[in-house]
Amino acid sequence: MGTHVITGAGSGIGAEIAERLRERGEELWLLARDAGRARELAEHFPGARTLVGDLAEPERLSWALSHQELPERVDSLLHVAGVVDLGKVGELTPKVWNATLAVNLVGPAELTRLLLPQIRLAHGHVVFVNSGAGLNANADWGAYAASKHGLKALADSLRAEEGGAGVRVTSVYPGRTATPMQAKVHRQEGKEYDPARWIPPSAVATAVLTALDLPAGSEITDLRVRPSA
């Protein structure tokens, strides 16, 4: 049984991954942005532990986690949480840029730094659920794509730095996935949302678990998941 720290377990891909791991009897530590959200996660995932820390305020994560019990070892740290706000570069404000970069890039970097001793101890695995926007940037996706391109760079640097310590690092790049975030994107685009057109969260969860379950001594570095025709 492994110990897994998961962000974004409240819905979508994160919830699917957490449920699959819980069904396997794994130990879960779920990050929540506040105490109320932590209670909701604990009720939804019986037996899971919770940590309270807001990725939107990365500079406060160290203080927040220092006042809580942490797992002694971390077999996997799964970065799934994210935010998106569409807009043209000529219209996006610093508030949107800073909020997007905080949750999608700086928060994951800081959480990884804070848990790295436990990850090294377990020869653990860090998984970044990125996005197709982390490989290609389209119009109106500037802030989100920049944060996800940065997340790829973070993963690549971490792999180069920690591979010698036995730490595995994987980036997963899903295409459009049927999640509450995708529903929000469609509202921002002014389009009708049909979840049947997009990847089910279960498919992305399967990709993540495939990377986690790979035998020791090998790793999946980058994995793309796309909607079929």
Image (spheres, rainbow, N blue to C red):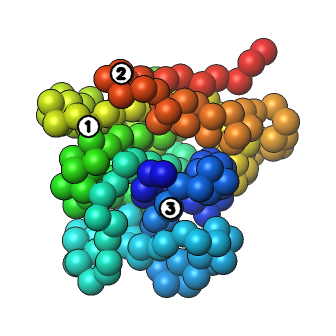
As drawn, the label of residue 167 is 1
Q: Quadrant of residue 151?
A: top left
Query: Horizontal and vertical percent for residue 121?
Result: 22, 50
| Residue 70 horizontal side relative to residue 158, left or right | right
Q: Can I make out residue 113 in this image? A: no
Question: What amino acid type should be assigned to the residue bearing mark 3?
Answer: Leu
Direction front: furthest residue: 1
Query: Residue at label 2?
Result: 218
- Asked whether 173 or 102 is in front, the reply is 173
- Mark 1 neighbour class, 10 Å CA radius: few under 14, some 14 to 19, many 20 or more: many
**Placement of the C terminus among the 4 image quadrants:** top right
The secondary element bearing badge 3 is classed as strand
Q: Please say if the residues under marks 1 and 3 sit with CB atoms less than 8 Å apart.
A: no
Where does label 3 land, which residue?
28
Q: Is residue 112 above or below residue 158?
A: below
Mark 1 and mark 2 in contact (Cβ < 8 Å)? no
Marks 2 and 1, how far apart in space? 11 Å
User: Residue at position x 35%, y 21% from top?
Assistant: 218
Place residue 215 in its image quadrant: top left
Q: Position of residue 192 (x, y in %)?
A: 83, 43
